[in-house]
Image: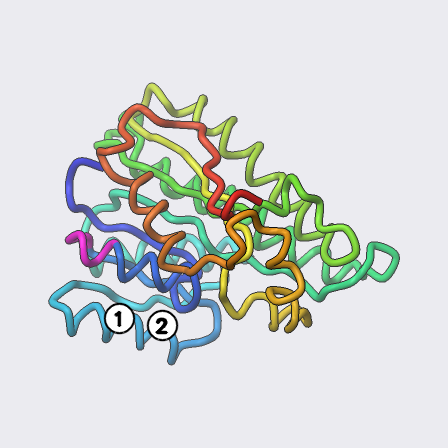
Amino acid sequence: MSEKRMVIVTGGGRGIGAATCRRLAAEGHAVAVNYASNEAAAHQVVAAIEAAGGKAVAIQGDTGQEADIVRLFETAERALGPLGGLVANAGVTGPVGRVESITPAVLERVLAVNVTGLFLCAREAIRRLSTKHGGKGGAIVNVGSRAAELGGGGEWVHYAASKGAVDSFTIGLAREVAAEGIRVNAVAPGLIETELHAAAGGGDRLARLVGFVPMQRVGSPEETAEAIAWLLSPASSYITGAILPVSGGR
């Protein structure tokens, strides 16, 4: 994006999403901070942005529900102006566990948010950004995971498979809309210090796996946000369809 237009960040209340909201606001973008249920966390992000002189609004919406996604985009544009970019960060892991213990309810929820929701968020963004539809172009950054290649065996194959879909979707969509002024890329975070691991039931996961990271440390949400901001910026103007690992070499 060459202009400082509004950006929607799904799952923007915590972790990588929150760090991304703060980073983009610091660059001068108005930011729609989407959240599913943690209203207090999202409003804390908005308050921090406003205290620093930026512009943001918190918008509730479950990205596993089409109606909520449509409302998110409409509300964001009414509050902050025309869309310039999308960071599709919202995602769920489901509980840590082997494939033989998976339930249809867990699988349906993971796929609803991580795959179907991703498609529908992109659909709404394209309808607004594509020059084919009268838009000014823009950028989409999807948040995938290194789990897509590592597989998540013994922990969350269901989550890894959903993130494999993110990679395929990123490549395909990038080629589909490249001539319509839209760049589509993804980041693939590795071991990042967020609440995701404990929420899934793997509270010791970072400590247990950090030894497998060549850089011998876990990453931060802010480091991931830097990569996202770069992929949204004019500095990456000739990059589309890329999947950028943010993983310390793992």
Q: Percent x, y for residue 207?
A: 62, 67
Color scheme of the displayed model? rainbow
Which part of the image, by quadrant, shows the N terminus? Answer: top left
Q: Secondary structure at mark 2?
A: helix
Q: Which residue is mark 2?
A: 42
Which residue ends up furthest to the right in the rendered image? 100
Which residue sits at x=51%, y=50%?
215
As shown in the figure, which amino acid type bears the numbered disc 2? Answer: Ala
Camera-side residue of 1 and 52: 52
Which residue sits at x=37%, y=58%?
72
Using the rendered view, name the quadrant where residue 125 is placed: top left
Relative to 155, 60 lies left or right: left
Q: Secondary structure at mark 1?
A: helix
Residue range in magenta is 24-29
Instruction: Say if 155 sits above or below 240 in the image.
Output: below
Q: Which residue is mark 1?
A: 46
Q: Are marks 1 and 2 in contact (CB under 8 Å)?
A: yes
Camera-side residue of 39 and 28: 28
Instruction: Say if 190 sits above or below 134 in the image.
Output: below
Relative to 96, 29 lies left or right: left
Camera-side residue of 107 and 196: 196
